[in-house]
Image (cartoon, grey):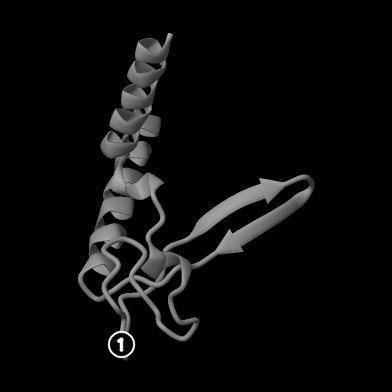
């Protein structure tokens, strides 16, 4: 019975090792200074002029919640261009 328990332990360890970076919180992420602003995409520290902000919208019960995470000058324009492209694609699909 111990050999099968050992096999299960190996499987769990293997799953943890394959976990993606997004699913594991680092010590830095958990304990970063409240005044430190980081880009929500690339996690670079945002100093001075930023690249705008993203927008998350979700509901909890009857309440609508918004969050506007900061974006760096490199990622902000990329997100804006991607959003504009998708918007144009949707308009084209509606026009057909």
Residue at the image position 33 percent from the left and 23 percent from the top: 11
Residue at the image position 33 percent from the left and 30 percent from the top: 15
Kindly identify which residue carries mark 1: 47
User: Would residue 47 appear left or right of 53 to someone viewing this image?
Assistant: left
Rendering quarter of residue 86: top left
Considering every residue shown, the one lying at the far right of the view is 62
User: Would residue 27 appear left or right of 17 to someone viewing this image?
Assistant: right
When the figure is inspected, residue 16 is found, relative to residue 96, above or below; the finding is below
Considering every residue shown, the one lying at the far top of the view is 1
Residue at the image position 36 percent from the left and 38 percent from the top: 90
Q: Say which element carries label 1.
A: loop
Q: Position of residue 47 (x, y in %)?
A: 30, 87
Q: Nearer the viewer, residue 85 or 25?
A: 25
Q: Position of residue 80 (x, y in %)?
A: 30, 61
When the figure is inspected, residue 68 is found, relative to residue 62, above or below; the finding is below
Check the picture and name the quadrant holding the C terminus: top left
Check the picture and name the quadrant holding the N terminus: top left
Q: Position of residue 56 (x, y in %)?
A: 51, 56
Q: Nearer the viewer, residue 16 or 74?
A: 16
When the figure is inspected, residue 23 is found, relative to residue 44, above or below; the finding is above
């Amino acid at each position: 019975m111990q050999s099968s328990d050992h096999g299960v332990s190996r499987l769990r360890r293997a799953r943890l090792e394959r976990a993606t970076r997004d699913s594991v919180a680092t010590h830095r992420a958990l304990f970063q200074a409240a005044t430190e602003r980081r880009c929500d995409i690339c996690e670079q520290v945002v100093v001075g002029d930023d690249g705008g902000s993203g927008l998350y919208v979700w509901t909890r019960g009857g309440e609508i919640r918004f969050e506007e995470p900061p974006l760096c000058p490199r990622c902000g324009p990329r997100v804006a261009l991607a959003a504009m492209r998708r918007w144009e694609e949707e308009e084209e699909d509606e026009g057909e």
